[in-house]
Image (cartoon, helix red, strand yellow):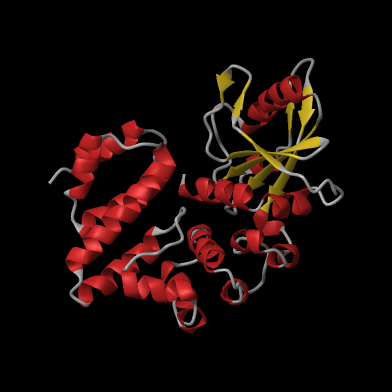
Amino acid sequence: MAYDNTCKYLAEKFPAAFVNWLLPNDRSGDIKILKTELIQEPIRADSLVFLQTNNQILHLEFQTRPYSEPTIAFRMLDYYVRLKRQYSCAIHQVVIFLQETTSEQVFVSEWTDTNTRHGYRVMRLWEQDPALLLSSPGLLPLATLSQTNSPATLLQQIADRIATIDEPNQQADLLACTQVIAGLRFEKNLIRQLFRREIMRESVIYQEILEEGILEGRKQGLQQGLQQGLQQGLQQGQQQGLQREAMSFITRLLTRRIGTIAPEMLEQIQALSVEELENLGEALLDFLTAADLANWLQEHQS
């Protein structure tokens, strides 16, 4: 789920980048992010994104696996009918497969039944030209999975592009997202080597990681930067202050993810060690409700 959620975050953080990429003829400029609830029945899928321009809706679905139940094709038909009923406008649907596979399912682009045929667009990232993805900051993390004869060179290009981003928060967010998505193709050691060496050491956000022991990117995929920062802090003998900083940071992430945290669960979080907070920072990427947090705390009680 971390990969799907990261893509969802990118589409909602950089909607214009996705519209320009997938709907290049749309020049409306005004883009609205729609909630993933249609009609009276909610759609529970973190990888769903609905972007509405003045005259059409771009429906995105990110997939790491080719199989699902119900099938992707049937879901696309279901979503289309709901969107059409509620908004009565043109609807463009795109399924984006992230991880390379030889499964025939990633080539399916329509639902067919006795009296029904519904088509949608399918994109396999490993077949996409990286040039356009490299030209837009919001698409840089996806470029790690695009077509290339030299994956390591491509990853280096992406790291160089991210290093040139001036705005610290945006740079940190994209760095974290890139590390998460790149994990579908690259070994962790290579990712850490390229994204944590000289190209990032002069950035403000990298200095904050070293000084505070915590990554201020605030979004999915932050566990890698958090782990490095925590280790740095421990080595410098700052364990108590680091625990407070980590607890505060994890609490903010949880609030963004699942809403207000009950007092009794907050007390349990405050009692966690630095290592346990690090584990919680990774686990919360898959949380959907407060019940998920309660279950995790119950399973990890000291």
Instruction: Report the side of 279 relative to 157 (left or right).
Output: left
- Depth check: 232 or 169 in front? 169
Residue 190 visible in the current orientation:
no
**Can you tell which quarter of the image residue 50 is in?**
top right
Please tell me which residue lies in front, 301 or 76.
Answer: 301
Query: Residue 203 at what x, y percent from top left?
Result: 49, 77
Q: Is residue 128 left or right of residue 2?
A: right
The structure residue drawn at horizontal position 30% and vertical position 54%, both measured from the top left corner, is 248
Q: Position of residue 194 (x, y in %)?
A: 49, 76
Position of residue 74 measured from the top left corner of the image (x, y, whole percent): 66, 26
Q: Position of residue 230 (x, y in %)?
A: 28, 67
Residue 266 higher or lower than 3, as above or below: above
- Viewer-nearest residue: 138 or 183: 138
Image point 39% across, 40% down: which residue? 287
User: Is residue 80 in sight in this rendering?
Assistant: yes
Tell me which residue sits at (53%, 69%) in the image. Answer: 168
Residue 166 in the image: above or below residue 141? below
Instruction: Count the labels in the image.
Output: 0
Q: Quadrant of residue 227?
A: bottom left
Q: Quadrant of residue 289?
A: top left
For this rendering, which residue is in front, 261 or 200?
A: 261
- Residue at figure coordinates x 33%, y 75% from the top left: 211
Q: Is residue 256 above or below residue 161?
A: above
Judged left or right of residue 58, residue 184 is: left
